[in-house]
Image: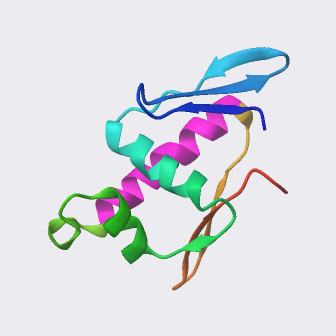
């Protein structure tokens, strides 16, 4: 409820301690992966679905691109909020959740 996403401007703001903090990602692709996670909040998403949803030509894209993006998103949230919002489920996929 404290998250504001502007898809057109590709900006994300989060309220922290009464102030609005912009969440900045290093690469544009990270925003696409983050947005897909938000659209599927708390669902377990497999790598194939992530690739199909975020890459224009997923058959030519390696899993490592998405894995690097997931790592970048984790680092951003760890730095800003001291939380890891993306949990890995071995041989199943990933889940984004800000809950405990």
**Residue closest to the eye, 87 or 96:** 96
Q: Label the magenta part by its dominant secondary structure.
A: helix
Image point 64% across, 70% down: which residue? 43
**Residue 43 lies in the magenta stretch:** no
Q: Position of residue 44 (x, y in %)?
A: 61, 73
**Residue 74 lies in the magenta stretch:** yes
Q: Quadrant of residue 80?
A: top right
Q: Which residues are magenta?
A: 64-80
Image point 31% across, 63% down: which residue? 64
Residue 32 in the figure: left or right of residue 59? right
Residue 49 in the figure: left or right of residue 16? left
Image point 67% across, 52% down: which residue? 85
Q: Position of residue 13 (x, y in %)?
A: 62, 25
Q: Position of residue 41 (x, y in %)?
A: 65, 59
Residue most extreme to the top: 19
Q: Can you say which quadrant of the picture contains the C terminus?
A: bottom right
Q: Quadrant of residue 1?
A: top right
Image point 65% across, 39% down: which residue? 78
Q: Quadrant of residue 82?
A: top right
Please count the marks in the image: 0
Q: How is the image coloured?
A: rainbow
Q: Is residue 91 above or below residue 95?
A: below
Residue most extreme to the left: 60
Residue 2 in the figure: left or right of residue 72? right
Q: Is residue 33 above or below residue 67?
A: above
**Residue closest to the eye, 99 or 74:** 99
Residue 38 in the figure: left or right of residue 28? right
Q: Position of residue 70 (x, y in %)?
A: 47, 54
Residue most extreme to the bottom: 91
């Amino acid at each position: 409820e404290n998250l504001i996403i502007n898809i057109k401007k590709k900006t994300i703001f989060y309220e922290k301690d009464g102030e609005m903090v912009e969440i900045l990602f290093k690469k544009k692709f990270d925003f696409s992966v983050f947005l897909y996670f938000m659209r599927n909040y708390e669902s377990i998403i497999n790598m194939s679905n992530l690739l199909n949803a975020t890459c224009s030509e997923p058959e030519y894209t390696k899993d490592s691109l998405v894995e690097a993006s997931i790592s970048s998103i984790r680092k951003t949230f760890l730095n800003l909020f001291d939380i890891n919002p993306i949990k890995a489920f071995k041989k199943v996929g990933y889940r984004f959740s800000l809950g405990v």
